[in-house]
Amino acid sequence: MKGENNIRLLSGNHAVSWGVKLARPQVAPLYPITPQTPILEKLTEFHSRGELDAELLTPESEHSAMSACVAASLTGARVFTATSSQGLLLMHELLHYASGARAPIVMFNVNRTPGSPWAFWPDQIDSLSQRDTGWIKMYSESPQESLDTVIQAFRISEKLSLPLMISHDAFYVSHAVEPVALPQQEQVDSFLPAYKPELRLDTSLGQSFGAPIDQATWNRSRRETAAAMARVENEVLETGKAWGELTGRSYAALEHYRTEGAGVVIVTMGSMCGTVRDAVDALREQGSAVGLLKVRQFRPLPVQTLRNSLAGIPCALVLDRNYSPGMGGILHQELKSALFAMDDAPRVHGFLTGVGGVNVASMKIQQLVTEYADAEPSVDSVWVE
Amino acid sequence: MDMIDYPDGEQFSPGHVACAGCAEALSLRVILNTIGPDAIGVVPPSCTAVICGGYPLSSVSIPVQHTTLENAAASASGIKRSLNAMGKPDTTVVCLAGDGGTYDIGLQALSSAAERNEDILYVCFDNEGYMNTGGQKSSSTPLNAITGSTPAGKLSRKKNLVEILAAHRIPYIATCSPAHLSDMSAKIKKAESIRGTKVIIVIIPCLPGWGVADDAAVKTARMAVDSGVFPLYEVEDGVDYTMTINTRNQAVNAYLKQQKRFRHLSDADISDIQADVDWGWEYLLDRAGK
């Protein structure tokens, strides 16, 4: 790998903390929650050793943590926080507020089942149920990707003045330890310019944020958000390319794995992608033309790129590690919507796999491909035992 | 008559949209002018949010973040830490909140900021209810008061926020009244000289919410102080109590009769309130060592 000589064994969460440290945030309000806590503890450890020069706050709730994030960001600081599940849901009000205020906060969420009943398992419903809050939303598959993405996130978010949430799955990624290449501080500094917003709370400027407005102005604010959202995919691509030039690891909104000539493409997000790669390899070995389309950028949904990627493919299987009661899997819904009125769209099958963190083995995925490759699709998502 | 001793540096502009005769607008003028231009305001939904004005106008000269209802103290913490990170630790960060946003939904965030002793000045304009939503009870509404959500009178006492904050051992807590503007300005100046969490509670008789005449806000505030219903005092480091005015010169009766929200009270109710106020007054004198 280019310019890197530092490979460490890191959990997904510690990889995030390393990425955050390298990105030099100025303010980080943090509140503990399983299974996010190792991110917080590693950051406070860096801070106590003098390796992270940031103002750390430890308020009484995630709601106050996100409140402090918004305010600090509007005052012109680079801001980071991390959370999971209940914490993210408690922040809900402020997630809308943050995007409305165009505060470029970077937040890491560890996907975990929300109560009730209480559980701590990987499931993406916590972050997916925040899909309409106006945040850029990205999903990571591995500790390396989490580290790389958190650094890229600051550049994307600050460039577009949109908050950005990255998620990785509880335990499968958050606590799994893998070799992770750490970039050099100088590399990150050259990649990530200091944050200097033109508009900010500053006594020398006098601008205020968030005052009551009329209908037309509120409407305009959301049109401006829409215009910024329309620039996200290209920014994700440019930033991912620049990161690739620096480190040898490039990224885009979607990732194709062995999709060339595929009769079946499996579409999924997060840790499930690793298992799908294994299933794809096994099926290719057996002579089946199967590939993986990994959704890394979920909001804004890269609709046109999804359409281009799946045009002419006979069959797509969507694997959802989440369940929206009454409407099935969320990625399944989104993909059906993205492929609307497309002549050469694939038959789309949706599967509720891994809801609540249950294991989805490579063999199970291979069976789904065999069983459904030529089947007529149903509009509903199918529960997988 | 004494001249009011506070600077007027045009930090608060005429043409704002407070109710005519509102003592909160008067208090804002004194407080903002005492603090001066090197400040950032934090305003949760409240009468202050309305008085500060809708986009693109503002009646205050300082930059303001209009926050959500429950997070003024957390937002102020974020601004202060951001200013610290940028090498501007001397800029005042001042919350201008109502009692709903302070005693009720904002108490958790305020408690946490106080526990961390964040370097912020928190001003609560206490009009004893959700007056900006048309007058419903908050935990600051006093016993027996009629509000939109307590049409037969509130059944429980006003929460003692000063005692709650004192238990956090923050460096400075004070009560103020718009009938005592020089004192208000002096307390703001004192708070400004202290690092850490400072909380100032200002009694604001709400003209429509309390049912008092348009020209009676300041007079009603003075009666609240003179009767001991709302004593003016300071608490330093949570333990050192000082009475600003340590005498009372009237019973609660006249204060209560002045307000529509208390018109239904029987003589027995008034006696009970008087007993409660007497107890509170003696408690404070005792704490202040008088």
Image: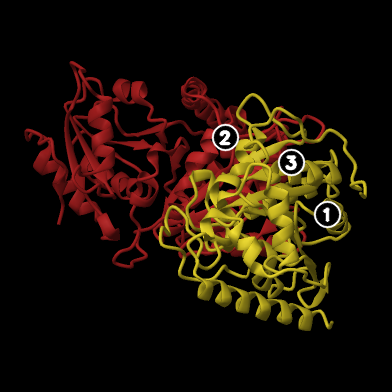
- Frontmost residue, A228 versus A202: A202
Instruction: Please tell me which residue is depicted at 79% across the width and 68% down the height of the picture.
Output: B233
Residue underneath mark 1:
B188
The residue nearer to you, when weighing B13 against A294, is: B13
Q: Which chain is red?
A: A
Name the residue furthest front. Answer: B267
**Residue B105, percent from left and from top:** 52, 57
**A197 shown above or below A89:** above
Q: Amino acid at mark 2?
A: Ala
Residue A186: numbered disc: 3
Colour mapping: by chain
Using the rendered view, name the quadrant where residue B231 is placed: bottom right
Up/down of A276 relative to B194, above or below: above
- Circle 3 Cα neighbour tier, 10 Å, few/some/many (<14 / 14–19 / ≥20): few
Residue type highlighted by circle 1: Ile
Q: Nearer the viewer, mark 1 or mark 3?
A: 1
Depth check, mark 2 against mark 3: the one in front is 2
Mark 2 residue element: loop
Q: Check disc 3 and give the amino acid type.
A: Glu
- Check chain identity for marks 1 and 3: say if they share one: no
How far separated are the C-alphas under marks 2 and 1? 30 Å
For disc 2, the marked residue is A101
Chain B appears in which tint?
A: yellow
Is residue A179 at all visible to an observer of this figure? Answer: no
Q: Is residue A277 left or right of residue B213?
A: left
As helix, strand or loop, the secondary structure at mark 1 comes to: helix
